[in-house]
Amino acid sequence: MTTARPRQTGDAVVQLRRLAHGRTGDKGNRSSISVIAHRPEFWPLIVDQVTEDAVRAQFAHRKPREVRRYLLPRLAAMNFVLDDVLDGGVNDSLNLDTHGKSLAFLLLAMVVRVPQELLALLPGEPP
């Protein structure tokens, strides 16, 4: 694992979606969310900042019982497993909006810091 880099004055704050895309699935009351870096250069930043604690905070309103992160460095990806975040699961929940793709979008809305030297690599609108 990498060591967190100190915050620099020139860092930009952007949504994680600028650095990565996501996939998600659910089984019962468990959600699995993958985060895949758009570029290998973004991988260390994602590992440093998209931690179990940060994801737990992002999903605090869903009150996950447990958040586990699995790193897949050869793919520049990670997978999060969140327990008890789906209102009992698809068959038990009256709130279907909390399932599937919407949880990946919630995670990708998380903000991360990007150093100046990587800003030019970001796709989309400027930070």
Image (cartoon, helix red, strand yellow):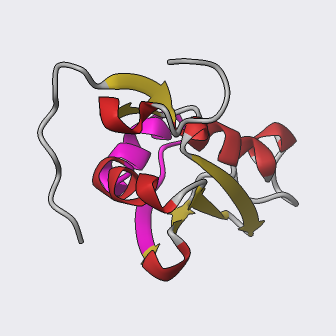
- Identity of the residue drawn at 60% across and 54% down: 38
Q: As displayed, is residue 37 above or below residue 11?
A: below
Q: Position of residue 126 (x, y in %)?
A: 56, 18
Q: Is residue 43 left or right of residue 93?
A: left
Q: As displayed, is residue 78 above or below residue 58?
A: below
Magenta segment: does it hold 65?
Answer: yes
Q: Position of residue 109 (x, y in %)?
A: 58, 32
- Identity of the residue drawn at 47% across and 26% down: 14
Name the one closer to the observer, 11 or 24. Answer: 11
Quadrant location, the N terminus = bottom left
Q: As displayed, is residue 118 above or below residue 40?
A: above
Name the one closer to the observer, 71 or 127. Answer: 127
Q: Position of residue 10 (x, y in %)?
A: 24, 20
Q: How many marks are shown on the rendered structure? A: 0
The residue range painted magenta reads 50-70
Q: Position of residue 24 (x, y in %)?
A: 72, 60
Name the one closer to the observer, 25 or 63. Answer: 25
Q: Is residue 66 left or right of residue 85?
A: left
Name the one closer to the observer, 12 or 116. Answer: 116
- Identity of the residue drawn at 42% across and 68% down: 69
Magenta segment: does it hold 47?
Answer: no
- Identity of the residue drawn at 33% across and 36% down: 117
Q: Is residue 94 left or right of residue 117?
A: right
Q: As displayed, is residue 94 above or below residue 71?
A: above
